[in-house]
Image (cartoon, grey):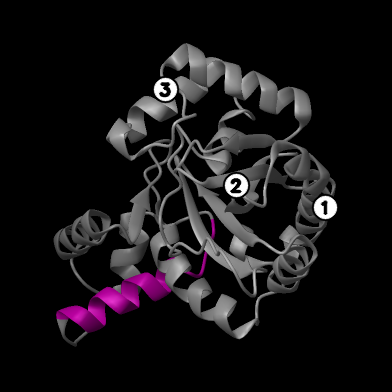
Amino acid sequence: MAGSQIERAFSLLESLTSDPRGLPMQTLAEQLDIPKSATHRMLGELMRLGYVRQNPDNSRYHLSTKLVAMGFRYLASSGADIVQPILDRLAQETGELVRLGVIDGDRQTWIAKSQGARSGLRYDPEMGQDAPLFYTASGHAWLASMSDEQALALVQQQGIADRADFGPNAPTSNEDLLRYLEQARGRGYALVIESSAVGTSAIAAVVRRPLDGGVVGVLSVAGPTARLSEARLQELSVLLLAATEELSSASPASELFS
């Protein structure tokens, strides 16, 4: 195919949207009608930028959540996606910030939100970021769905930020983290108070595919600790778990979880 490098790059990304199982490099080269060497270079650059990932099991190339997150930030703001009404209702019921993270390989990326607080203190971070696993409710909820060994390996892979940035109740060791995860498994949801930051609290629970139970996302409710005591968070957990069940049922119909 003729065209500029940027046209080729977008054509490659468009090709990757055609098959959720991913595509081998040979197929992409044939579809784009360019040499395999040029396709390999382009894929390498897109992987470096975070738009494409390669499945280590079969060497197929997939879109990463980075590009999906860009699209869903737009969809979330317009309310067009099927999951947004669920987030909006939970935010209205709780009066707090609701966030949805999607799982893509070894990453959990926050891609949609709804703010229920209309006045007073508000907790309202940016979307499109990976959830820190070591000290956030969203991270704990996902890690609690794994074995301890898998959870610790994923935390080590992501790395731990400067502890000076944590809240006063954040885990201080792997053993401490595992206690948080055990509590989350027992409750059916994760709960943190001033762990990710001073003055903020949150609860989170995983969203599972209805057919095989695989974790595809994490839903959380977060806000100022002044409003969200442990007792209040436990009350809100009923609403949170009901919303995760609804998202689970809706997940096959949403490209968000594909």
Residue 67, by quadrant, is bottom left
| Number of dots carrying numbers | 3
Q: Amino acid at mark 2?
A: Thr
Mark 2 burial class by Cα count in 10 Å: few <14, some 14-19, many 20+: some
Nearest to viewer (mark 1 / mark 2): 2
Q: Amino acid at mark 3?
A: Ala
Residue 67 is left or right of residue 26, and the answer is right
- Tell me where the magenta segment starts and ends, as one range: 5-20
Residue 201 is left or right of residue 86, and the answer is left
Q: Is residue 29 magenta?
A: no
- What separation in Å lies between label 1 and label 2 (alpha carbons)? 18 Å
Quadrant that contains the C terminus: bottom right
Could you say whether the residue bearing mark 3 is in a helix, strand or loop?
helix
- Tell me if residue 210 can be seen: no
Q: Which residue is mark 3?
A: 153
Query: Which residue shows up at 19% across the image and 60% down it?
Result: 45
Q: Which residue is mark 1?
A: 239
Query: Which residue shows up at 52% across the image and 60% down it?
Result: 123
Nearest to viewer (mark 3 / mark 1): 1
Could you say whether the residue bearing mark 1 is in a helix, strand or loop?
helix
- What separation in Å lies between label 2 and label 3 (alpha carbons)? 30 Å
- Tell me if residue 6 can be seen: yes
Q: Is residue 238 above or below residue 115?
A: above
Q: Which one is in front, 28 or 45?
A: 45
Mark 1 burial class by Cα count in 10 Å: few <14, some 14-19, many 20+: some
Q: Is residue 12 magenta?
A: yes
Of labels 3 and 1, earlier in sequence is 3
Q: Which residue is mark 2?
A: 225
Could you say whether the residue bearing mark 2 is in a helix, strand or loop?
loop
Nearest to viewer (mark 2 / mark 3): 2
Tag 2 and tag 3, C-beta contact below 8 Å = no
Q: Which one is in front, 99 or 210?
A: 99
